Amino acid sequence: MSQASAATLEFVRQRRRAHRLPQQRSDRFTGLYTVGLYTAIGAWLGFQALRQSPTRGGSSTWLTGGGLARVATVALLLGLLAALRYATWQGPVVFSAPEVQFLLGAPLPRAELVRIRLARGLLFGAGVGAALGLVAFVLLEAELGVAAWPLLAAALLGPMALGVLAAALGWLVESSPATARAVLRASPVVLAVAAVAWLGGATAATVDPWSGPWGWAVGPLVAAAGGHEPGWPVQAVLLAVIVLAAVLAAWLRAGRITMEELERRAGTRAGLGASLLMGDPRGVALMRHEVVRGLFGVRRLRLRHPGHRWLAVPWRDALSLLRAPGRVGWALVLCGGSALTVAVAPGRRLLAAGAVVVAYLGAAQLIEPLRGEADQPDASRQLPWRWGDLLLLHTVTPILTLTAMGLAGTVTLALLGLLPGPALGMALAACLPAAVALVWSAAIAGQRGRLGLDRIMTASVMGELGGSMYLVRWFATGPMVALIALLIPILILQGAIGHPSSSTQAATNAASLLVTALAVQGAWLRSRQPPD
Amino acid sequence: MAGAPVLQLRGVRKTYGELVAVDLLDLEVQPGECVALIGQNGSGKTTTLRLVAGLLEPTDGEVTVAGDSLRLDRSRAALSFVPDSPLLYPDLTVREHLELVALAHGVGDGVDGRVNDLLELFGLTARGDFLPGQLSRGMRQKTQLACALVRPFLLILLDEPVVGLDPPSQQALHRILLAAKQDGAAIVLSTHQLPFAAGLADRAVVLHEGRMVAQGAYRSVVGGTIAGRLGLR
């Protein structure tokens, strides 16, 4: 590092230290000590409890027979994807706004300043990986009771290496808008591939060398856990090589970022901190949307406006979706995956409930304009409709989009011969009501506006349990409404599979319940007033 | 100017706890009339406009627009509102904002021409395909004004409409509002920019600490002793 950089950073460090009160230093130490102590005690108690559990060893065959490989590979892939998506708007190297103005604005080599942050980011990535690895070690050791040291080494080193890789790749994404755009575009595809790997890999007992760094990080763990994984040394070497290459590339690219980009991220970080402090996930989402808009620019598109005034809001929502096609992609992946899960795994209630929640999250992707309306309800004063009617108008385009997706998927499956005749008719008939139920559930949650400071204050005066329940209820409302509307009809229909004589009765019962739920949802939405 | 008033406030009061923002306000505005609300900061001008726009519920009293309660859709269609800070959708371009409002109010076949005219008048033509995030504050204010003017209305409420506007746009707005007045629309505006209001307002209402302390012909009220004592000239 140059003398000027070192002197400047040392000055900043000394001044900050000088202004930090002894009490603050003591509090920080106490906080770290407490977290460390509780983690160690919790891990030990959890380990002992699992080890002495009467069901211990019950999952060992499944784990060593391919379950561990499948679960860990998909989990690490999703973790890496999340880290790369985070790097599209924040990432491992983020300065504060004063640092951008005073440090990066000074005539100091930018690469040197960035490398200090990058090194911290790499260490943080390794730390997160180690923490996750430690949890995996405790669970596996308690369940399997294999030799501890090899398992500990594999559980720590693999995720640590992947954490470092995530940070290094994160910087490459952060420093290149083109790469950031590619990550955002590819994310739904990667998620779909992960889902297919999960569903299709039921018999795979090993992790193959071509499975990518997320698989290579798992190979040694599977071997140490007693699974059949003869290729693990090759995977370990491949992982080490790719991590080193990524770190080297990131290090060399340290200076290749514009001040504008760093300033933008610094501004976002300040807003992010404020939103997190206030427990406002919507605020975080809005900041991320703004960054994504900045990355892709304005899509210059024209959509001929309709002749009838009642179509104005659906037209406006269609424009919004065309401008952010990634939302349609996510909805397709999440809702499509859920529908397939429900279809291929009848009789598993928990899985069906999970599928409904995931489908709800997919539908929620499509109601962004409604959420935007609830963010600033005063803006709707320009439109001639009551709030409740406006909400229902905002659900028209999402419902049509989701229905079209469902119909297209159903017809495709039928053409591939995967849907028999009676099931095809039922699936086609279910597309519209299911779409309405999901979109209206998302609208019921979305129309409340942001979780503002007033609600946080309300929760804070309700006591620990009451306040927590208040916040849980806030976040769980949408999924719960979707579950109430859809889960029982789904279970009724699943129960009739294989019993042709009762299928008509089951379909009638399911349809009656769903129609009742939709009537309640629609009436409730229509009766809403704008949020305060 | 006698006849059925477009806007009528009877004994309107708005309180926040112990704070009285607007106190027992009575006001009538006739078609084709422009009323300027003037007063110091915190005098209740914005609260009054937001009460009329239906964005606030009065604690007491009644607000009617074109004879209808504000709860009716008909009154929403009759009333156009420009808030003091622009409220725009982050995912729609300038042009699409205007198209949405015009379509929603049933402008019909003339949408494109009307939108283009207003973009031209406010100097927004080159930025028609920009999102609000790419615009300066003044440009966003112009977009908000254009949205309020692109649709038919009987009454338009403007809260500090010229803050952030360049002189040509102020003149354009002045011309459009004069034309609207001549067509029979009523205007209620709140402003500290008295030169802008001078050529437009028929009547002035002076608010002080939520109460109406003077009202009458614009020139006599602005030139009167109360306005002078409050330092509003």
Image: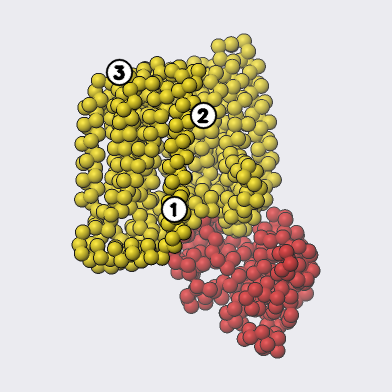
Q: CA distance from mark 3 to mark 1?
A: 45 Å
How many marks can you see? 3
* Image point (39%, 25%), residue name: A141
Q: Identify residue for label 3.
A: A228
Q: Which mark is residue B118?
A: none
Is there CB contact under 8 Å for labels 2 and 1?
no
The numbered mark, 3 or 1, whose residue comes first in the sequence reads 1
Tell me where residue B41 sits by quadrant.
Answer: bottom right
Q: Are marks 2 and 3 on the same chain?
A: yes
Q: Residues within 10 Å of mark 1 (few under 14, many from 20)?
A: few
Q: Is residue A195 above or below residue A170?
A: above
Q: Nearer the viewer, mark 2 or mark 1?
A: 1
Residue that numbered label 2 is attached to: A355
A376 horizontally vs A36: left or right = right
Residue B147 lies in quadrant: bottom right
Chain of the residue displaying label 3? A
Q: Is residue A517 visible?
A: yes
Name the residue: 62% across, 50% down.
A460
Instruction: Name the quarter where the C terminus of chain A is drawn.
Output: bottom right
Residue denoted by label 1: A28
Which quadrant of the rendered structure holds the N terminus of chain A?
A: bottom left
Between discs 2 and 3, the one toward the N terminus: 3
Which lettered chain is shown in yellow? A
User: Residue A266's x, y, as percent?
Assistant: 38, 58
Residue A211 place in picture, x, y as percent: 29, 28
Q: Nearer the viewer, residue B43 or A62?
A: A62
Q: Residues within 10 Å of mark 2 (few under 14, many from 20)?
A: many
